[in-house]
Image: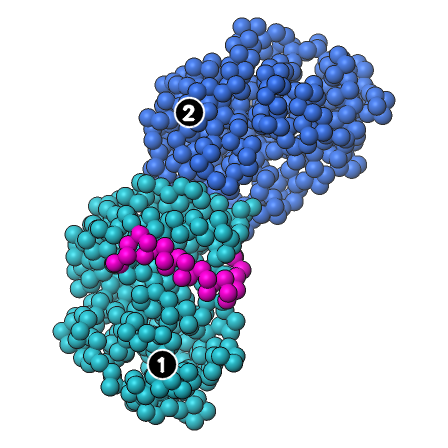
Chain colours: A blue, B cyan
Amino acid sequence: MSTNVHGARPLRFGANYTPSKDWFFGWYDLDLDAASRDFDQLAALGLDHIRLFALWPHLQPNRSFIAPVVLEQLAELVRRAKAAGLDTNVDVLQGHMSGMEFMPVWLSTRHRRSIYADPDVVAAEEELLTAVARRLRDEPGFLGLTLGNEMNLLVTEYPTNLDEITAWLPRLLAACRAGAPEATHLHSTYDAVFYSEGHPFTPAHVGELGDLAAVHSWVFNGTVQRYGSDSEIVRRHAEYLIEQAAAHLNDPARPVWLQEVGAPLPLIADDDLDAFVHGTVQHALDCPSLWGVTWWSSHAVSRRFTDFKDLEHTLGLYAEDGTVTPTGRAFAHAVAQARKDPGAPAVRHTAVLLPDERTSDPRAAYGPGGAVFEAWMRLATTGARPALVRPAQVESGAAALNGITDILRPEDVL
Amino acid sequence: MSTNVHGARPLRFGANYTPSKDWFFGWYDLDLDAASRDFDQLAALGLDHIRLFALWPHLQPNRSFIAPVVLEQLAELVRRAKAAGLDTNVDVLQGHMSGMEFMPVWLSTRHRRSIYADPDVVAAEEELLTAVARRLRDEPGFLGLTLGNEMNLLVTEYPTNLDEITAWLPRLLAACRAGAPEATHLHSTYDAVFYSEGHPFTPAHVGELGDLAAVHSWVFNGTVQRYGSDSEIVRRHAEYLIEQAAAHLNDPARPVWLQEVGAPLPLIADDDLDAFVHGTVQHALDCPSLWGVTWWSSHAVSRRFTDFKDLEHTLGLYAEDGTVTPTGRAFAHAVAQARKDPGAPAVRHTAVLLPDERTSDPRAAYGPGGAVFEAWMRLATTGARPALVRPAQVESGAAALNGITDILRPEDVL
């Protein structure tokens, strides 16, 4: 039997904070009162936390210079969020935001070198993470740091490999802890970590490193295109990723944070939006490991800004004109329901057996259209509430310990 | 006979402004009072103008967004410079500064596209230049715009060709004029424009486009390494570049601005520094076309900043501790001498004939070690005060009109 962690640990609901005023293009000329108004709006939706993003070139414009004024800005934003009733997680090494990559000059053009392995660069990243953590550790409402937003998106610009990432992530997480030992620190990845064969960030990195395991669920990854905006599969994509993370936890007590999920319009059709938002939240609540759900994003990227993919303008809980979007209404409603009656997470007796990652990279089977994805979805959409288990978990008895009694290979299901 | 333009148009002496406080890494958190103190220091050296650099990502963080606060900062800096007695030229599209390249996110990583030819990008550059010019046009002391600092340094990151640059420069200069019709607008290049065969920016672009023709003289380009820190050739490198620009003017009334010149230590040995600074200024004054001399740079880049080439820390007129450097003392002395007695520019009867640029690219012969460079220096260092002329100028009679009577091919000299 799985324990009801929802009862023991209240679920958290929040938003990835994208400023209403000038998006991050206004970050250099921060309007604190506008930020406070944004935070009040998010609290009004029933949310309890935000994910706040620093801009790396702004925060650390030179390898040996952390801008004091920007540290103070982060602290002030954390304080103002708390004043609105919101706790704050801070992502530091941005880096990637909505298709834009804010890289400091000392890592660009002629100064390009590995952000994952160059000794000088990694030392500077450590210093920065420690400095931010130390500055924020005593701010009420400060939850902890995420190293940076989806830093596995930068592997194209900064090629790397498994060994480098396996060494890098623990070093940077230790740097966070050095600055704020009591806070909750983690790293974040987009779904190539689960779906791309050979990708240097792995499911083990998600499951084994950091105080929370974070997943980012984006159905524009081929899921909605393949299965349709009105499909249950689309509404279960986040749940599936949470189960993927859960299957890779080395410590079953480590919670999984659905740190990003969003409704990209018009890929999600207007008519399907409500079901998508509610279904996504409800299915996530079914996962025993769930820590919370953080919607992407708080405020729409204004259409007066160019060079974004169109869908980036469609994701806000609040629209450009300051009104709540249909997505915002649906999420607020789902949150209210969940707070009123979170329910018990589903007891999972059935699991799909993952191919053995110790012998080959199984990730081609994990993604949309892959055998594991298809088998899990087949079971999930026919009432079975399946988990995922690794052969190593079966061998060690960990699967049985978690109540898993029926273990099916993908080919047994399909 | 050349006319004494020095008499008609007072020579200008200034500095390229590199802020003492946190270099451009502090630009996001501008300390106006520190800037005023910097300006007062430069005025105290007898200077009359600065060249002021915007940071492109700060000023235009999105292709369709010019940050109003940064426009105001530029205006305030121009006002404060004027309060100190300094006029200001503003460089806009930085871009390149001392080996760092500040590029907006919308031109980086996945958004990389030609800064010289992409229609959307060029339109955004035009908008920005017009907006900056319009905002500054009525500020007392505003001289005009330079498109950006040595934008020909960006051709590695953003490949281009002669036709694109030939179309691009006039468009951007027109955009400056649209915003400030009365001001003096120009573009700037590093010396690949004169020395690199096939380089897409050409001497004709220098001589024919913009209200001033700008040259940047950096003897670390091989000159000091080849000829020695104590050589007259090193002290005449700036003069040679001014004569190169003068030879390519389509309008002999267009002045040539020695917009950047500096003393890179220890390539210039301590013992040779005084002679280098005085010689550079005096030889430049010999050029009839000279508008003025602007030293690089005002304030040393602090050594607490990493990832600069060592020589970048050695160039300031003021040192990190706020004292005048030996370079600063020498330049101030040379400026005082020049203001007291600018002398008449040398009458030039002798010229080295450039290879015909209409039939092949002659630039390999122009640089240090090349036949034109060597011939001109041979004559210059033996008292002849040579000019440079193009075959087309000889054919049209323009050379004779300028008083050139002795025209020597490089092989006649060497």
Displayed quadrant of residue B248: bottom left
Indicate which label's residue lies in the foreground, 1 or 2.
Answer: 2
Q: Is residue A283 left or right of residue B68?
A: right
Tag 1 secondary structure? helix
Q: Quadrant of the N terminus of chain A?
A: top right
Residue corresponding to mark 1 = B233
Q: Is residue A233 left or right of residue A331?
A: right
Q: Quadrant of the C terminus of chain A?
A: top right
Specify the subunit that label 2 lies on: A
Classify A67 as above or below B254.
above
Question: Can marks 1 and 2 be said to lie on one chain?
Answer: no
Closer-to-camera residue (A27/B169): B169
Tag 2 secondary structure? loop
**At 53% from the left edge and 46% from the top edge, which residue is drawn?**
B111
| Amino acid, disc 1 | Ile
The answer to whether the residues at label 1 and label 2 have Cβ atoms under 8 Å apart is no
Residue corresponding to mark 2 = A321
Specify the subunit that label 1 lies on: B
**At 20% from the left edge and 75% from the top edge, which residue is drawn?**
B6
Prevailing secondary structure of the magenta residues: helix
